[in-house]
Structures are given as C-alpha cells and as structure tokens.
Image (cartoon, grey):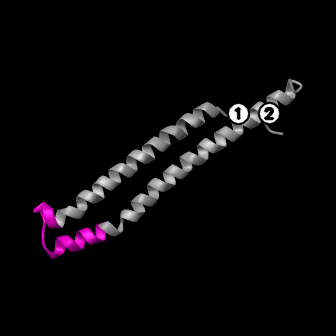
C-alpha cells in the first residue's frame, strides 16, 4: 500500500476559505445583477429599447454566474468532507498500529 501524506487541517482551512469566497461571490453577483436590472429604467445613463435589450441579454447570463458560485461552494464542501474522512481514517490507522489502545 502506498503511503500518502495529507495535511487534513490545511485542507479543511482551504475549504473553509473557499466556502467564504463562494458566499462573498454570491452576494456580489446578486448585488451586480440587482443594479443592472435598474440601469435601463432608472439609471438614466442608458435608456430605450437598445438598453432594455442589452440588459435582458445580460440577465440571461446570471444563471451561469450563479452556477459558478454553486460549483465553487460544492468543491469546498467536498474538500471539507473528504478532509474529515481522511482525518478519521488516519486516526483509525494510528489506533490500529498502536495496538488498539
């Protein structure tokens, strides 16, 4: 059996940071698209049919941005779960090697 070294605490720390980034990203994307929804109507910077069409098209991309944030969150959660499983398995192996004490 090959020996693999893993710092489960480091992986857990990275996954926690990734989860924090995913949450912050989701908040920023939500704010961005909320702001973009008002531009052609309330922004007075760009109005009319072309503005409405452009921002309707941009709004269609919102789901892709949300999906990216969800993917980042899922990777973070998976890393966290896997680091806990690895930590538990390492503890079990160490206990076994110590004679079950």
Circle 2: is it few (<14), some (14-19), or many (20+) Cα within 10 Å?
few
Label 2 belongs to which residue? Answer: 92
Q: Is residue 94 left or right of residue 99?
A: left
Dividing the picture into quarters, in which one does residue 98 lie?
top right
Residue 72, placed above or below residue 7: below
Would you identify the image quadrant in which residue 51 lies? Answer: bottom left
Place of residue 7 in the rendered image (x, y in percent of width and height, measured from the top left):
64, 32
> Which span of residues is magenta-colored?
41-58
> Up-down: is 53 above or below 98?
below
Q: Earlier in the sequence, mark 1 or mark 2?
A: 1
Q: Quadrant of the N terminus?
A: top right
Q: Residue at x 24, y 68 (%)?
A: 55
Q: Is residue 44 magenta?
A: yes
Say which of 41 and 46 sits in front.
Answer: 41
Separation of marks 1 and 2 at Cα, in angstroms: 15 Å
**Element at label 1:** loop
Instruction: Residue 4: tell me if it is visible.
Output: no
Q: Which mark is residue 5?
A: 1
Q: Residue furthest left?
A: 44
Q: Is residue 1 left or right of residue 39?
A: right
Image check: 11 left or right of 99?
left
* Quadrant including the C terminus: top right
């Amino acid at each position: 059996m090959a020996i693999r070294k893993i710092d489960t605490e480091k992986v857990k720390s990275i996954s926690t940071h990734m989860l924090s980034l995913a949450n912050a990203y989701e908040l920023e994307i939500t704010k961005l698209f909320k702001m973009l929804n008002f531009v052609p109507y309330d922004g007075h910077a760009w109005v009319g049919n072309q503005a409405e069409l452009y921002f309707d098209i941009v709004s269609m991309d919102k789901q892709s941005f949300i999906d990216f944030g969800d993917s980042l969150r899922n990777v973070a959660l998976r890393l966290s779960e896997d680091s806990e499983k690895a930590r538990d398995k390492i503890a079990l192996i160490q206990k076994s090697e110590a004679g079950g004490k």
